[in-house]
Amino acid sequence: MKRDLSVGSLHIELLRESPEQLRMVWRGRSEDRDPADYLNPFLISSIEVLSDELLVCDFRELEYINSSTIPPILRMIKKLHIDGKSARIVYDSNSSWQTASFTAFRIITDTMNLIEISGE
Amino acid sequence: MSAVVSMSASMPPTWSLVKEIRKNSSEYLQKGSHSSVDFDAVIMVVSELVENAVKYGVRASDGTCVDFSLSVHGSRVKITVKNGIEKLEDYESVIFALDAIHGPRSSEELYRSRLLQIYDSPIDEKGRLGLYRIAYEGGFDIACQLESDLIKLTAWRDFNHEA
């Protein structure tokens, strides 16, 4: 399993915090023209190795994403949902752009039992 | 603070133009006393508009590839991006999005609706999300004009004085 991804200003690190929990930490900025080219395969492969763990997708240290980054994040949520995985998406509630972006995703996750979005 | 940042590219732009414009815009805004919320919103709008121009624009008949300006007059910030378009459908696609933004549905509703469309149909991932994000997250108003084969997008907003 690929444990981290670094492309340009974006860094994603996958950490095992316990046998029951993995944390995917997003840092830096996602501002490339076609981030789906590398995000989709990385995120899909990261999800496919999950068994019963909770995946915490931690975006609190992410400084910025462009709108081209949003489809890969939605695809990740879809993969998690289809595969029946448990996930918690965490954003920085003190950041106005993160609050706007991630609360909007609730239109999709509010009907999902195993995936939640929370501001911290 | 009533100066202007402007940049123009008459060569087909590369993606590095987006970073360059964002950097120049950040430096310009940092001279004023804007809240971090306003700063982030303006830079996001600058990025989204210029990214669209670089991705979808072509060289216009007057030689313009991407033309950008950012100005602050009093509490009003205005961003203008021009780029050439290949076909009228490109302009009509923008007008379709702006008609929705100026219509009865809130910008939040439009943005969420677009997220759902992208979630349900990954093939239809491109287009309009950036404009809806500018309206919803950025709180900007947007207008579009067609000048021959040049499309001009203008986004504006008043700065909030509370952080």
Image: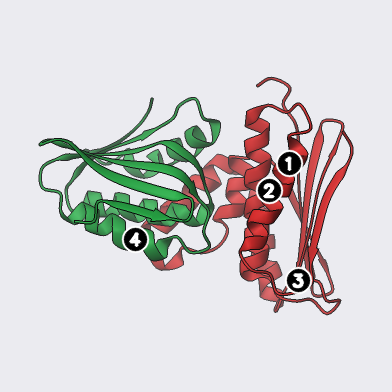
Chain colours: A green, B red
Q: Which residue is mark 4?
A: A40
Residue B103 shows up from this direction: no
**Label 2 amino acid?**
Lys
Q: Secondary structure at mark 1?
A: helix
Q: Which residue is mark 3?
A: B65
Q: Which residue is mark 2?
A: B23
What is the spatial separation of the Cα atoms under label 3 and label 4, in whole angstroms?
31 Å
Residues behind callouts 4 and 2 on a single chain: no
Q: Which residue is mark 1?
A: B27
Between tags 3 and 2, which lies in front? Answer: 2
Q: Chain of mark 2?
A: B
What is the spatial separation of the Cα atoms under label 4 and label 2, in whole angstroms?
28 Å
Q: Secondary structure at mark 3?
A: loop
Q: Quadrant of residue A55?
A: top left
Residues behind callouts 1 and 4 on a single chain: no
CB atoms of marks 3 and 2 within 8 Å: no
**Label 4 amino acid?**
Asn
Residue B128 shows up from this direction: yes
Q: Is residue B141 above or below residue B83?
A: above
CB atoms of marks 3 and 1 within 8 Å: no
CB atoms of marks 4 and 2 within 8 Å: no
**Label 1 amino acid?**
Glu
Q: Chain of mark 3?
A: B
- The crowding category of the residue bearing disc 3, from other C-alpha atoms within 10 Å (few below 14, some 14 to 19, many at least 20), is many
Name the residue at 77% across, 41% down: B28
CB atoms of marks 2 and 1 within 8 Å: yes
From the top left corner, tell me how far across and down residue B85 is, in percent. 72, 74
